[in-house]
Image: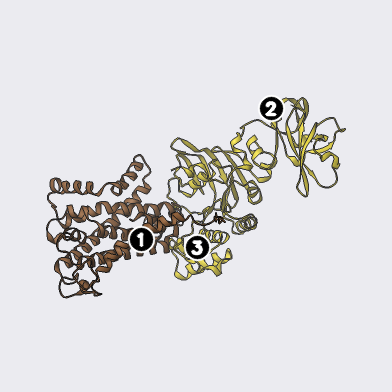
Chain colours: A brown, B yellow
Amino acid sequence: MSRLRNPWGQPRFLALITGGYIVWSVVPVLIAIAFAFNNGRSRTTWQGFSTRWFTGETGSVLHDPALRDALGHTLLLAVICVAVATPLGVALALGLQRWRGRGSGSVNSLMLLPLVTPEIVMGVALLLLFLQVFSGIGLGTDAQAIGQITFTLSYVVVIVRGRLVSIGPEFEEAAADLGAPRRDQFFRVLLPLLAPAIVASAAVAFAVSIDDFVVTQYLSSDASTTTVSMLLYSSARGAPTPALNAIATVNLLITLLTLAFAYYVYRRFAGRDEAASLATMEV
Amino acid sequence: MEGEIRLEELCKKFEDVVAVDGIDVDMPPGEFFTLLGPSGCGKTTTLRMIAGFERPTSGRILLDGNDVARVPPHQRNVNTVFQSYALFPHLDVAKNVAFGLKYHKLSKEERATRVRDALEMVDMAEFAGRKADQLSGGQQQRVALARALVLRPRVLLLDEPLGALDAQLRKNLQVELKALQAELGITFIFVTHDQSEALTMSDRIAVMYRGRVEQAASPKEIYEEPDTVFVADFLGVSNLLDATALGQDGAACTVEVGGRKLRAEQGATDARGEVKVMIRPERIVLEPHANQGDDRLPGIVERSVFLGGSYEVHVRVLGGELLRAMVPNDGSAASADLEPGAAVSLRLPPDAVRVLTRSEPDEATDGVEESEAEDVPAQLP
C-alpha cells in the first residue's frame, strides 16, 4: 500500500537543504568558539574547559599585549568610523532624497557601488590614493579610518534612505502646515522619526568596521595598526594558540550583539517589515 | 469677515504636465467650498498651492486680499487636514494637537486649555494620552481635525479626509464636518472626487476637469443646471443624447433626436447644429407605448433594476440611444411595462431637457466609476 503524500506538507528535500546548510555554516564556527575555552594549547584536541585564553596570566586576550592592542585598535577604528560615517551618511541620505533634479538617479546608484565593488579593488585603489595623492596623510590609523568610512557610509545612506522613503514627505508638510519653520520640521519631526534608522545604521557601520579585513590591512602601517582580523590572518599559520579562538569569539560576540541591538531598535520603532530588510542586508 | 480665498489665473506645471491650467475661483469667507473632480483634474494640486506645499508656476492666491503665493506654508494662516491624517507617530494625541501652538505666544495654561477644548470639540478628550497608531481611522481623522482647528486658521483645507473610511463612518462624519463648519464659521476648502459627498456638504462646488474649473456654483445649480457636458455627466446619473438643434420656438429649442423632435427649455436654447441634450433619469416619465405625441420617444425596455424605492429602467429608444429612467415604485407604472422587451414611450418634459454645447468628457474619465487614486501630480517623482 502506498501512502498518499500530503499535498499541504512542507517539501521535505527543501527542509533538508536548509537544515544541511545551517549545520555546514554554523558548526565550524561553534567548534572554533568551543576551542576558545580549551584548557590546553591545542586547537584540535579537547583538554577540558577553562577561560585561561580570555583572562589568564599569560597569552590571554586580556594580558597578551599584541592581542589586547589589536582588540583596542579594532574598537577605536569602529568608534571613529561610526562617529563620522553616521552623521555624514544621514546628511547624504537627506540630500539625495530631496534632490530630484538631473543626475540624482545616477548618484543613487553610485551610492550602492561601494557595496558591490570587490573589496580588494577598493583596498588597492585606496592604497594608491594614500601613497600617491594624499601622501600627507600616509598609511596608518587615519588612512584606515578614512578607508572604512568610505564604504560604511554606503550602508548608512542605504538604511536611512529606505526609512526616508517609507516616512514620505507628508509629516514634514504637516509640521510646516502647523507653523514649524524648516529647522523645527527637521528636529521636531523628521529626526525623531529617523532615529531608529540612524541607530540601526550606526550599529551596522560598527559591525562592518569590526569585521573588515581587506581595506584595513591595505591601509595599515606598523604593528600598532593591527586589528583583530589582521592578527587572526597573520598568526593563523604561525604558532596559533586557542587565544586566537578567544579573540575571534570576542569579536564575533561584539558584532552579533551590535546587530541584534540594531535589529531590536529598528523593529521596535520602525516596524517589522523594514527590520526584516535590514536583517537581510547585513551579511 | 475673514477667510476669503481668491485664485487668479492660477497655474501649475510639473515639467511638461499642466496640472492646473489658469483657474479663477472665489471662495467666499465662512463657506464650505468643495473642489470636485476626477483623479488628475488638478483639485489636490490646487489645494496644495493654497496650503503652500506647491509653488504656483504663475498666478495669484489672495488670502483676504493679500497675495500669499510666495509665502512659505509655515507662515500662512491656513491649516490642512491630510488625506492620510499625517499624525506624528512619535507623539501622543495631546502633543499632536499642541504641536502648532508652540508658534503662538501662549502661556502654558492657555495652551493646555486650547488643546483640551479642541479635543473635546471632536469628542476625543479621553484619548489624549494615546499614540496615533492606537487609534482607528475615524479617531485619527478627528485628531487631525483638532490639530488643525486648535490654531484657529482663517481657512481650513481638507484633502479627501473621508477617503480612507468605511461608508457608514463616512456618512456620519460628513454630517459632523458640515455642522462643525457651520458652528465655527471658518472657511472650509474640501477636496473630493465623491459627488454625493460634495452635494451633501457644500455651500458651493467648483467642478474641475483637466486642470480647469468647469463650473462653480451651489450644489443645486451644479446638479440641475450644469453648464457643460462634463459637469452633467460627472454629477449624478444623466442621460446625454446626441442631437441636432433646429431652432427656437418661444422659450424652447427644438432638437432632433433619432428622427424625433423634442423641445428643450433649459441651457443653451439658442444653439444651432450639433449639440448634446441632457435629462436626469428621475425626470423621465415612463408611459405605455400607446402614449405617442409631443415630447415623447418610443423605445424598448432592455432591463429593469429594482432599487427598492424605485426601478432603474434602461430603454433603447428609436435611433439607438440608451436612456436610463428612474421609475418610482409607487404603482404608477404597469409592471408589464418594466419587463425586458416591453415597448414603452418615454416622456421628456421640456423643462427638464437641457441643451449643452461644450467640453466633451472622454471615456477615461467617466466620473462615477473613477478610481480613488490620487491626482496625477501627486504621483510624479
Residue B357 rendering spot, x and y as whole percentages: 65, 30
Residue B203 rendering spot, x and y as whole percentages: 63, 49
Question: Do the residues bearing badges 1 and 3 touch, measured as CB atoms within 8 Å?
Answer: no
* Residue nearest the observer in this picture, A170 or A165: A165
Q: Do the dots labelled 1 and 3 sit on one chain?
A: no
Image quadrant for the C terminus of chain A? bottom left
Mark 1–mark 3 distance (CA, rounded to whole Å): 44 Å
The residue that appears at 12% across and 51% down in the rendered structure is A136
Q: Chain of mark 1?
A: A
The disc at residue B132 is 3
Q: Which marked residue is nearer to the observer: mark 2 or mark 3? A: 3
Residue at image mark 1: A23
The amino acid pointed to by label 3 is: Ala
The disc at residue B271 is 2
Residue A179 can be seen in this image? no
Q: Which marked residue is nearer to the observer: mark 1 or mark 3? A: 1
The residue that appears at 32% across and 62% down in the rendered structure is A27
* Residue nearest the observer in this picture, A149 or B27: A149
In the rendered image, the residue lying farthest to the front is A1
In the rendered image, the residue lying farthest to the right is B290
* Residue nearest the observer in this picture, A1 or B160: A1
Is disc 2 placed on a helix, strand or loop? loop
The amino acid pointed to by label 2 is: Ala
Residue B21 rendering spot, x and y as whole percentages: 51, 37
Q: Which marked residue is nearer to the observer: mark 1 or mark 2? A: 1
Image quarter of residue A36: bottom left
Is disc 3 placed on a helix, strand or loop? helix
The amino acid pointed to by label 1 is: Val
